[in-house]
Image: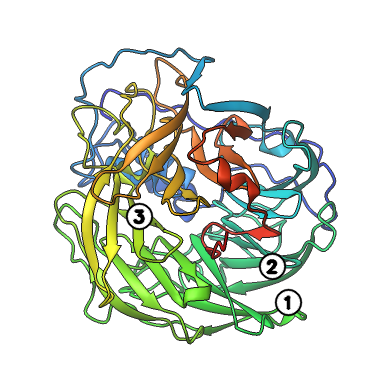
Amino acid sequence: MKNRTWRAPRPRRHATVIGTAVAGLVLAVGMNGQAFADDEEEREGASTRSAGSSCSAAELAELKAAGDNFAQACLPGNDFAGLKAQPDTLKPGESDSSDNLSLIANLPKQGPFASEAALNSDLAFKGDYVFAGNYEGFMVYDVKRPKYPRIVAQVKCTGAQNDISVYKNLLVLSVDSSRNDSSCASTAQSATVKTSWEGVRVFDISNPASPRYVSAVETPCGSHTHTLAPDKKNKNVYVYVSSYSPNAAFPDCQPPHDKIGVVKVPVDDPAAAKLVGTPVLFPDGGQPAGGYSSQTTGCHDITAYPSKDIAAGACMGDGILMDISDRENPKVTTTVRDTENFAFWHSATFNNAGTKVVFTDELGGGGGPTCNPETGRTKGADAIYDITRLGQLKFGSYYKIPRTQSNTENCVAHNGSLIPVEGKDIMVQAWYQGGISVMDFTNSKKPKEIAWFDRGPISDTELKTGGSWSAYYYNGYIYSNDIQKGLDVLSLDDKRTDGAKKVRMDRFNPQSQPFYNN
């Protein structure tokens, strides 16, 4: 990072909101609302190193302002400045793929989301629609004809990551950005101010072309990500809220923050949504500070498997399994650590049988180039675990994409989902600028890549944040939300996965896994 130039986010310009039915939205100009973005101390001393960091204060402030976990790239052990130059097999604007995976459509970012600072994030699916998060709000795409996706709504509602899920006629957004109020017209306000707000927002999407803002619930430390777990009667949907990194100076985000939030949303009365619990998951403190793995001060993401009453949590320095049979009171049943190779437990994916789980390590916070020989095959990778009959996690192997990426490409394991192939464990996964990889982990000790798609770097002179944030399989196609390039639709044509094309879903939240009964 010492020899790297980071481009400052360009000022946002006013633009037309397409198909927005949320009253009173204002196209706010400014940073994405992280409290530190307005901290004068962060902006001063740009040429000096921040304490305990390999970045200058200016570099650190910019990565923090980008949100997610990007600033982890500045922590000791994540300094990639000394990497050897890697050959650029692909140039900016070029792409390549395996013979069985092809890009069939792309819709670029536009309107208030067009700027480089407006990062695309996660995806959720309902019927013929894809709902795509962006740090400035969310998009709604009609994908009835996957080769010809079209925009039906663009909702401007700044909330940093805007992690997104849908359930029936409800849409939930995570807000991990300290705001002056809960409205879509809110502005950034320091988390040191007691009245500042962050948490989850709830929308009515009964008409996908006209999303309607219904309610908001404040949660401790905001909501970096969230996971939906409907109750057995489908009358209420529970939202497991993950957040981390408390600060004694933040009244609503106090250490040790060893918990998650549980929000109850009545399906027929979403305006009555409320926080019903903050269960402590790490009464003994979790992974301590000072080692290779991150200190556990909350969870980054949780993947639920509601039909099996289980969930897997990726919690910074800990990987956990939970019993969620009592939706309001999830309980940790087992914990695993990897203090040699896992820097930051980021996300999880079960196999269909619920007998395996793939955890991801977001080494460098998604902001660094880790897909190279120096970093190696076991760091910034997936870790595949078998779930034993006693409910314990037994390590199988690591998986990492085999293609070396250039030093100007942020690349690390990120969000993916299962592909519903009967008798096989196959998933598709995003690797930021490492592209998209399809992995067969049927043999948990010998995972193998069976398909891939990769773009060249955004820049061959600067490391910029980009690439596929999320890559998921839905009703016969792979959908990817590229941070800078927009929505991608890809076709996977392989006899090993063709059976999945017969599986049709009415709704899909990758962090709330369905059971596929082929």
Give the Cα separation between the discs numbered 1 and 3. 33 Å
Quarter holding the C terminus is bottom right
Does residue 232 appear in this view? yes
Residue ID for mark 1: 270
Query: Of tags 2 and 3, which is closer to the observer?
Result: 3
Kindly identify the amino acid type of the residue bearing the numbered disc 2.
Val
- In terms of depth relative to the viewer, which is nearer, 287 or 480? 480
Do residues under tags 1 and 2 come within 8 Å of each other at their CB atoms?
A: yes
Q: In which quarter of the image is residue 73?
A: top left
Residue ID for mark 2: 202
Give the structural element (helix, strand or loop) at label 3: strand
Horizontal and vertical percent for residue 303?
Answer: 46, 64
Sequence-earlier tag: 1 or 3:
1
Sequence-earlier tag: 1 or 2:
2
Task: Characterize the local packing of mark 1: few (<14), some (14-19) or many (20 or more) Cα atoms within 10 angstroms.
Answer: many
Name the residue at 47% across, 78% down. 309
Residue ID for mark 3: 358
Horizontal and vertical percent for residue 503?
Answer: 63, 53
Give the structural element (helix, strand or loop) at label 1: helix
Kindly identify the amino acid type of the residue bearing the numbered disc 1.
Pro
Give the Cα separation between the discs numbered 1 and 2. 7 Å
